[in-house]
Amino acid sequence: FSHLSLSFRMVGWSTIESDPGVFTQLSHDLGIRGTQVEEIVTMEDSEFAQMAPVYGLIFLFKWTQDMAQAHRSAATCVENSNIYFAKQVINNACGTQALLNIMMNAEGIHLGDQLTEFKAFTQDFPPDLRGESMSNSEMIRGAHNSFARPEPFEMEERKATKDDDVYHFTAYIPFQGNLYELDGLQEGPISLGPCEDTSCWWKQVRPMIQERIEKYAANEIRFNLLAVCRNQRDHALQMISQNRFNTELLKASLLSHGIEESDDSMQDDEIDDFTPVPMDLTGLNVEQLKQRLADCRSQIHEYKNIVASEDEKAAHHRQENARRRHNFIPFIIALLKTLAANQKLQPLIDAAVLKAKAKTEQQGKK
């Protein structure tokens, strides 16, 4: 689990934010390609459909001893040697382990050389030893801790008490015709039953997550749901390439009918390992060919908008991640010294104290 009131430096594993930009960059730093992480806000069908295919869900919730015991007693842990499941053996690693538990089981994901070797090396390990191996991996721990917030003081790691807010990440995946919850605090994968439709498996998991949320008090709103999905920019570029290819086929077919179409701009990013599939034009008349051509051009325009939107989102994530990783402490100390040298610090402190007292008195009158 993650203890949100403490941040540790590079001694162990730091806390990380449940943020799509953080998890997307973490995946990239681990060498994973072809995926991204998006935040689920409404849990409506349309929101999931826009991200399809969804490889897995990462759910962040407030962890309590009572809730954990109740969930453990109701859960059915199974032994399935085909599922890659790592047990959590160190604090604050649950977010990265939830991400990796999804990635290691998803089909069609490029893990990169290092993670591929790591998976092969630990494939026959029991869950606790897999978790130990993840915790001891310099590559995985380094990528995780790159998001650690700089701290002015080193603090010794301590166990959370009942008064601390403790949060935990768990993962949900479809795998070989069944649904599973992969919770690093459990002994093994939790079977959630057969998967009725792999294309929209999240429809079965959604009520389970909603039920867990409803068990908390009405004023508890600190939940977060992330979806690990296909990289939307890469997919849009592939669709542009496919429609460009179809456009040229259609123009050539129209030219055979004596109709010459204008040239189309071909300036787009190149896509590696993608081969367009020729469109079947058998039996199409001129009007049908023109309609197909118009459809292809329209889709190119739509996918270009998606690329632009994803580029804007990625730039925002880069900026936010740079701010997370930047050490602002020297700037803050310099600012405080400058305020003190100009006799402006003490008045600000006095005003803040008076404001705090007034707020406390106001709350006491309620």
Image (cartoon, rainbow, N blue to C red):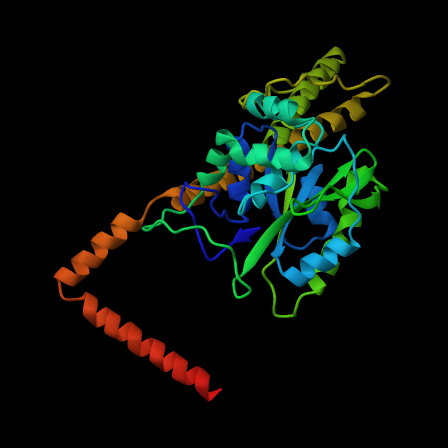
Relative depth, front residue between 333 and 311: 333
Place residue 301 in its image quadrant.
Answer: top right
Q: Is residue 99 left or right of residue 138?
A: right
Examine the image and state in which quarter residue 104 appears: top right
Residue drawn at x 40%, y 44% as measured from the top left: 9
- Looking at the image, residue 106 lies above or below residue 219: above
Residue 221 position (above or below residue 125): below
- Point out residue 135 in the picture as x, y percentages from the top left corner: 54, 36
Note whether residue 307 is visible: no
Residue lying farthest to the top in this orientation: 256
Image x and y of residue 250, in percent: 72, 19
Splitting the image into 4 quarters, where does residue 54 fall? top right
Residue 293 shown left or right of residue 36 in the figure: right
| Image point (84%, 40%), residue name | 197
Q: Is residue 10 left or right of residue 289?
A: left
Instruction: Single out the residue that lies furthest toward the bottom.
Output: 365
Q: Position of residue 129 (x, y in %)?
A: 63, 34
**Nearest the camera: 96 or 48?**
96
Image coordinates for residue 89, horizontal then vertical, percent:
59, 42
Which residue corresponds to the image point at 54% horizontal and 27% vertical from the top-left? 31
